Amino acid sequence: MKITEQQYEEMVKASAPKSTVIINCAKAFLVGGAICAGAQLIYNQLHAMGFSREDTGTLVAAILIVSAILLTALRVYDRLGKFAGAGSIVPITGFANAIAAPAIEHKKEGLVLGIGAKMFLIAGPVIVYGTLTSVIVGLIYYFVR
């Protein structure tokens, strides 16, 4: 049985999954925005309580990190990631999730080889890059100054 090129293209169009790019972008925007808006609400509340701007920023970062790790341990962050995609990778919560998830997953392998080693599986290169970059920038600043 021979089919024409046009018939083949119609068959491909009919069997191909429908694109959900717009829906996925909307989910990512809403969830990422909700995380950021929640962080801003926490910031405003702590600042209103009398904390300095610097202390408030540090406290908000700590609260977001602890929250992301708890949600990862309770498997809520996984479901959020499946729903929101890139929206759940807001920098600080996504990084905390990237460190906590492998550690939780490999806890049966022991403290050192399981939790200790797997914790930096994904985040390790980021930490190394950040550390080396800060050293290089510090040296440049020291010698140019």
Image (cartoon, helix red, strand yellow):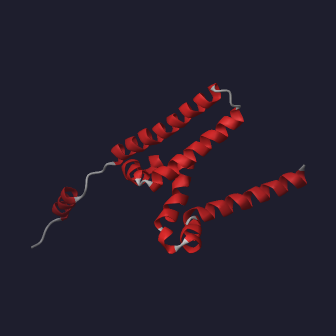
Left or right: 77 as drawn, with respect to 123:
left
Q: Is residue 8 above or below residue 24?
A: below
- Give residue 63's position: percent from left, percent from top: 57, 43
Q: Could you tell me residue 13's position as x and y percent? A: 22, 56
- Tell me the residue at 36%/49% (across/down): 83
- Quick one: 91 or 49, which is closer to the camera? 49
Q: Do we see residue 90 in this rendering? A: no
Q: Left or right: 83 with respect to 90?
A: left
Residue farthest along the left direction in this orientation: 1
Asked if residue 124 can be seen in this view, the reply is: yes
**What is the x, y in percent for residue 21?**
35, 48
Residue in the picture at 15% in, 61% down: 7
92 left or right of 32?
Answer: right
* Percent coordinates x, y for residue 98 in the rendering: 52, 58
- Among the 4 quarters of the image, the one containing residue 52: top right
Residue at 63% x, 40% y: name it: 59
Count of residue discs: 0
Up-down: is 1 above or below 39? Answer: below
Closest to the observer, 102 or 8: 102
**As rendered, which of 140 and 129 lies closer to the eye?**
129
Q: Please give the name of the residue rendered at 52% of the width and 46% of the height, measured from the top-left corner.
A: 67
On screen, residue 29 above or below 134: above
Q: Residue 60, located in which quarter of the rendered image?
A: top right
As drawn, which residue projects farthest toward the top?
Answer: 48
Image quadrant holding the N terminus, namely: bottom left
